[in-house]
Image (cartoon, rainbow, N blue to C red):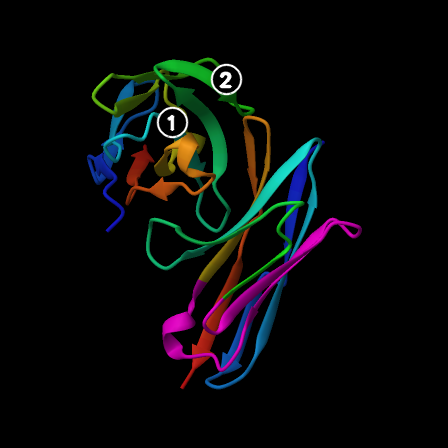
Amino acid sequence: ETGVTQSPTHLIKTRGQQVTLRCSSQSGHNTVSWYQQALGQGPQFIFQYYREEENGRGNFPPRFSGLQFPNYSSELNVNALELDDSALYLCASRDPSGGETQYFGPGTRLLVL
Amino acid sequence: EDKVVQSPLSLVVHEGDTVTLNCSYEVTNFRSLLWYKQEKKAPTFLFMLTSSGIEKKSGRLSSILDKKELSSILNITATQTGDSAIYLCEGRTGNQFYFGTGTSLTVIP
């Protein structure tokens, strides 16, 4: 148990729809990162939030957006879903003052039909 | 282009064998390299290596960073069936994070 939770665990959407995935970080972890992991691949970095501001972004289009809240929870929003968005979405939290170690949640499995 | 490459992609060994997993990184302004074990969904942290700390050990697992070769290895001695998992390597620079595709390790009894 890492203390990081994600919801929902599974989700099915159709192409063109919008989806919101949620993550609850460990208390005190003011940094959260989101990753997309396609089947058989390593996680791909989407973006990172620190103190409610995005401070790092991978090679993902603007239809991937996020929010971080003062209560250590965060959201990943994906608009105009495409079939290739089907993947496991992972969030990971850390406390930068505690070093580089980050703790992953169990992920949300998204299927886009 | 920054990237992390892992090899081999998959490995099957017998219990008791020793395995070495490889990770090479081409990351601008390298900050740290991390190893994770992924069994079902959430990767779990194993080691972090930086330019100032190039060798780590925990039980049967150990890892070394070769700054000159821009690579790292993860060694597992006396493998057990519980070591079966995907092992991920992550390179970090500033606020960017790069994962390799992972090495799938299967340990046969």
Identity of the residue drawn at 42% across and 71% down? B83
Label 1's element?
A: strand
In screen coordinates, is B23 left or right of B86?
Answer: right
Mark 2 residue type: Pro
Task: Give the number of callouts.
Answer: 2
Vertical side of B64 occupied by A84: above or below: above
**Among numbered discs 2 and 1, the one appearing first in the sequence:** 1
Residue position marked by numbered label 1 in the rendering: A31
Identity of the residue drawn at 37% across and 33% down? A95
Which x, y percent locates residue B52? 65, 46
Mark 1 residue type: Thr
- Give the residues in magenta: B58-85
Label 1 crowding class (10 Å Cα cut-off): few <14, some 14-19, many 20+? many
Mark 2 and mark 1 in contact? Answer it, CB < 8 Å. no
Single out the mark in the foreground, 2 or 1: 1
Label 2's element?
A: loop
Q: Is residue B63 magenta?
A: yes
In the image, which disc is placed on residue A61? Answer: 2
Identity of the residue drawn at 48% across and 74% down? B60
Residue at mark 1: chain: A
Vertical side of A111 occupied by B105: above or below: below
Identity of the residue drawn at 39% across and 50% down? B43
Vertical side of B3 occupied by B23: above or below: below
Q: Nearer the viewer, residue A34 or A3?
A: A3
Label 2 crowding class (10 Å Cα cut-off): few <14, some 14-19, many 20+? few
Which x, y percent locates residue B94? 59, 27
